[in-house]
Image (cartoon, rainbow, N blue to C red):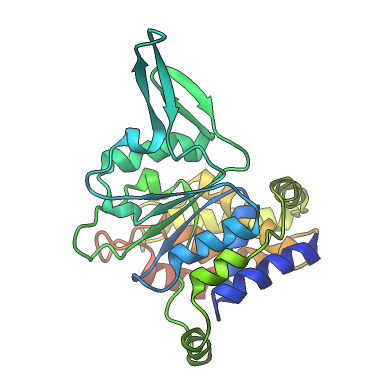
Amino acid sequence: MEALLNQVITQVGSVILGKERPIRLALACLLARGHLLIEDLPGVGKTTLAHVFATTLGLRFNRIQFTSDLLPADILGVAVYERESGEFRFHPGPIFAQLILADEVNRATPKTQSALLEAMEEHQVTSEGETRPLPEPFFVIATQNPVNQIGTFPLPESQLDRFLMRIELGYPDVAAERALLAGRDRRDLLAELPPVMTPEQLVQAQAQVRAVKVSPALLDYVQALLEYSRRSPHFLTGLSPRAGLGLLAGARAWALLAGRDYALPEDVQAVLPHVAGHRLQQVQSEGARGSEGLAVWFNEVAIP
């Protein structure tokens, strides 16, 4: 399985140049059965990253472009009356796929954003009084523009908490950007990529993540991090039990990517900023999430 996962990283890295760590974090998020939030400036490859993961992992893929006039029914689906049968027939929305790209999710209104809550947490959709399961595996990769840009609606805490990790891609380095400028169009490369894994193999890898061993000492370490975040003067509220479970799941996935069947404190530290950053709200700067206070916590406390 390690060799197969390395093939996934290599193929994604052939399209998203010079971003091995964000690619590994994104794959760890999917292996941990979590949803991923990518926040960055337009044009750095957020949408392309979701496309290449869907292709490489062999997942059925749908892209939803979030806009201010998007309605919940545009995502979930709607029941339409059919005159011939005299009955209402449910027409599934684009949410019924294995990997959903929620593109520019913070450009939709809070009402539309909330349409994702049940799907992301329970892998099901309730519409017209009936609950319908979503396909497995099921992931949401959402892209988000910086909240200071025009036409954005900040994601509420309940929505942010549904994302296991938040990552940034950033600008490429000089060598990667030169290769990007001199190379082929990324969309042409995407069209030629073969699947490296099947959905069944991905489910097997997820099962291996859950089997990664965690020692009592590591559980003590994670609990100490959670407790510190709750009493820290830097944050309005601390990390929830769900965040703690997500931190352990992410650490297990990071360990599996390193070829180990046991997790270390270094695995927790590798994923901590990406699991905790979007869940923590600073006291010093109302509305800012994580940055300065998280840096103090991570540098002075999280790493002994």
Please report the residue visible at 57 percent of the width from the left and 50 percent of the height from the top. 246
Q: Position of residue 206 (x, y in %)?
A: 70, 49
- Residue beneath the point at 73% across and 63% down: 5
| Residue 235 appears anywhere in the view | yes
Q: Residue at x 62, y 63 (%)?
A: 268
In the rendered view, tell whether residue 178 sits above or below residue 209.
below
Q: Is residue 206 above or below residue 301?
A: above
Work out whether residue 163 or residue 42 is closer to the camera in this orientation and state it.
42
Q: Position of residue 221 (x, y in %)?
A: 63, 59
Rendering quarter of residue 254: bottom right
In the picture, the quarter occupied by the C terminus is bottom right
Q: Quadrant of residue 159?
A: top left
Q: Is residue 217 left or right of residue 301?
A: right
Above-or-below relation of 122 to 232: above
Q: Is residue 177 above or below residue 141?
A: below
Q: Nearer the viewer, residue 177 or 214?
A: 177
Looking at the image, which is closer to me, 102 or 26?
A: 102
**Camera sees residue 304:** no
